[in-house]
Amino acid sequence: MSALIVTALGVGWFMARRALSGVEAVTRTARKISDTDLGQRVPIMARHEEIDRLAVTFNQMLDRIEKLVAGIREMGDNIAHDLKSPVARIRGMAEMSLAAGPYDNCEDDALAASTIEECDRLLEMINTMLMISKTDAGVSETHMQPVNIADVARAAKTLFVPLAEDGGLTLTCTAPDTVLVSGDLRLLQRAMANLVDNAIKYTPAPGTIEISVDHDKTNKEKVNISVKDSGIGIGADDLPNIFNRFFRCDQSRATNGSGLGLSLVQAVAQAHGGCVDVVSEPGRGSLFTLHLSGLPEIQTNPGD
Ligand code: ADP
């Protein structure tokens, strides 16, 4: 009798495990889905009818969501693309009007000048949106080359020192001579510039900004590029949103910006097989780190 109970319990446990493994597969897939990877699907095991039906329905729902998201992105790109020409035309007209001046009423000159400024801001936003979409789609192999990211960091320092000093900030850069990554130079420069520009924008004087590049301490094949500031910091509620397009923390609305800079940084990191993370404390500052895969240094003979 007891053998029968033990066998029944064993069979019951086995059946329950089998049924639950299908549910676990659905849960695992749902967890893996992120806004940049909607391509995951639940494997169909053909073992348990109910669970397989659930998996098929789940996969069909993912197909529809993937199509919807692709449609929304395409519409955004088309709108951005179609807006470029009219904005450029408005800018041209304002420029012609400014060149035809000076007018008796100097308000007309100021109006034309501010129209040009606003058009430039809009064009910059449109171009950044298009750049993010293009980068999200991946970096073309033809643009990939060995890049000394330490040089990119030093160049960013040189470029931004005057702006930092104007704002009463000290900008430093610590990097070895050579740290190689495989990447698109223009995109990496842009990501670096966005991080340093933000650090300057969101750090009141007197403050410090430290750029640093190094190999990861635990995994020498990885490279960390970080920008640390002693600025206003970011609240815990805002942190999960700062890489979303057009998101701006309430405290930064008085500062110029579009909310697209960090989305581009994230798109660049992911297109290079890396990621970007942030540690921040309101009132104390932020540390943004780009994690990329390094390339082995090219050995050259001293005689070469
Ligand atoms: P923006 O053009 O507004 O700077 P970003 O996408 O670069 O857009 O940044 C999104 C938001 O994240 C910013 O509006 C700001 O609120 C916050 N942020 C980014 N970098 C920093 C920083 N270094 N210190 C404090 N807040 C930051």
Image (cartoon, rainbow, N blue to C red):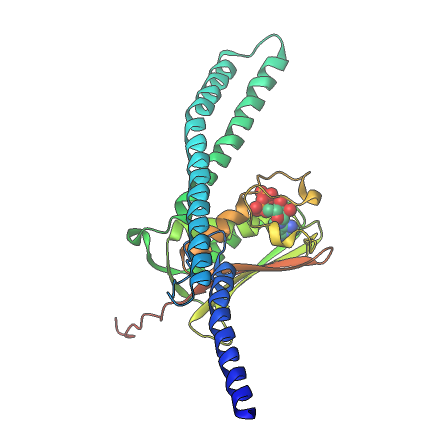
Quadrant of the frame with the N terminus: bottom right
Residue 17 versus residue 143 in the image, above or below: below
Residue 181 versus residue 140 in the image, above or below: below
Q: Give the residue furthest to the left.
A: 304
Image coords of residue 300 (percent x, y):
29, 72
At 44% from the left edge and 22% from the top edge, which residue is drawn?
86
Q: Give the residue furthest to the right.
A: 283
Residue 120 versus residue 250 in the image, above or below: above
In this view of the protein, can residue 83 be seen by the observer?
yes
Asked if residue 285 lies left or right of residue 6, the reply is right
Quadrant of the frame with the C terminus: bottom left
At 65% from the left edge and 48% from the top edge, which residue is drawn?
202
Q: Give the residue furthest to the top.
A: 104
Image coords of residue 228 (percent x, y):
61, 59
Image coords of residue 17 (percent x, y):
50, 75
In this view of the protein, can residue 200 be seen by the observer?
no
Viewer-side residue, 192 vs 39: 39
At 45% from the left edge and 27% from the top edge, which residue is drawn?
83
**Which image quadrant for residue 163?**
top right
Image coords of residue 243 (percent x, y):
56, 50
Q: Give the residue furthest to the front.
A: 1
At 56% from the left edge and 47% from the top edge, which residue is drawn?
244
Q: Report the label total.
A: 0
